[in-house]
């Protein structure tokens, strides 16, 4: 288990990969209610600048969240997300992973502190899909 004290600015973590499927997109549309045709209408998407259906941005962020080894961390709570940018489309068949660097640590209380990660979601060819700053409240090591 990694606690607040175990993280150092400059630490880099790389997650395992996950392939985004058509089923992911359809299930996310059903769950979220976001049936925008760019995601679910093959003919509409073919006429878009992307030439094909792409994953919802929030689907990509959600899948990326699940790629990190969250059960290995002493997480108290998700603290926030800043400067989210979708810099490239995530297409059906893209295998994504997360590259995260610790950029800041801030002690908040005797319970622990906030660890800030600059995260990049990258595909199997090295293309960035999304970037964001994630803040996680981590527990301090038990005394």
Image (cartoon, helix red, strand yellow):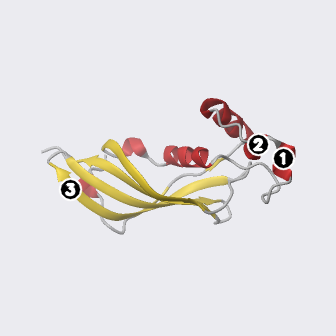
Q: Residues within 10 Å of mark 2 (few under 14, many from 20)?
A: few
The vertical placement of 40 against 45, above or below, is above
| Left or right of 84, for residue 21 | right
Mark 1 or mark 2, earlier in chain: 2
Between discs 2 and 3, the one toward the N terminus? 2
Q: In the rendered image of this protein, does residue 60 appear above or below residue 124?
A: above
Whichever of labels 3 and 1 marks the residue nearer the N terminus, that label is: 1
Q: Nearer the viewer, mark 2 or mark 3?
A: 2
**How crowded is the residue under tag 3: few (<14 C-alpha within 10 Å), some, or many (20+)?**
some
Residue receiving disc 3: 107
Which residue corresponds to the image point at 60% horizontal and 44% vertical from the top-left? 59
The residue that disc 1 covers is 44
Q: Residues within 10 Å of mark 1 (few under 14, many from 20)?
A: some
- Residue 37 is labelled as 2
The answer to whether any part of residue 140 appears in the image is no
Q: CA distance from mark 3 to mark 1?
A: 49 Å
Q: Position of residue 2 (x, y in %)?
A: 30, 50
Cα–Cα span, label 2 and label 3: 44 Å
Residue 28 in the image: state x and y as whole percent: 64, 36
Q: Quadrant of the C terminus?
A: top left
Residue 85 visible in the current orientation: yes
* Residue 81 or residue 106, whichever sits in front: 81
The quarter holding residue 106 reads bottom left
**CB under 8 Å between discs 1 and 2:** yes
Left or right of 26 in this view: 98: left
Identify which residue, 109 or 9, lies in the foreground.
109
**How many discs mark residues in the rendered view?**
3
């Amino acid at each position: 288990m990694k606690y607040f004290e175990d993280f150092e600015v400059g630490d880099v973590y790389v997650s395992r990969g996950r392939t985004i499927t058509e089923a992911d997109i359809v299930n996310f549309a059903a769950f979220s209610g976001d049936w925008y045709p760019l995601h679910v209408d093959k003919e509409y998407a073919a006429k878009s600048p992307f030439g094909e259906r792409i994953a919802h941005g929030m689907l990509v962020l959600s899948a990326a969240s699940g790629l990190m080894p969250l059960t290995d961390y002493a997480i108290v709570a998700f603290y926030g997300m800043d400067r989210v940018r979708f810099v490239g489309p995530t297409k059906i068949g893209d295998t994504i992973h997360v590259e995260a660097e610790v950029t800041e640590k801030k002690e908040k209380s005797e319970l622990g502190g906030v660890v800030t990660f600059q995260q990049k979601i990258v595909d199997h060819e090295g293309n960035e899909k999304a970037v964001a700053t994630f803040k996680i409240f981590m527990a301090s090591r038990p005394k």
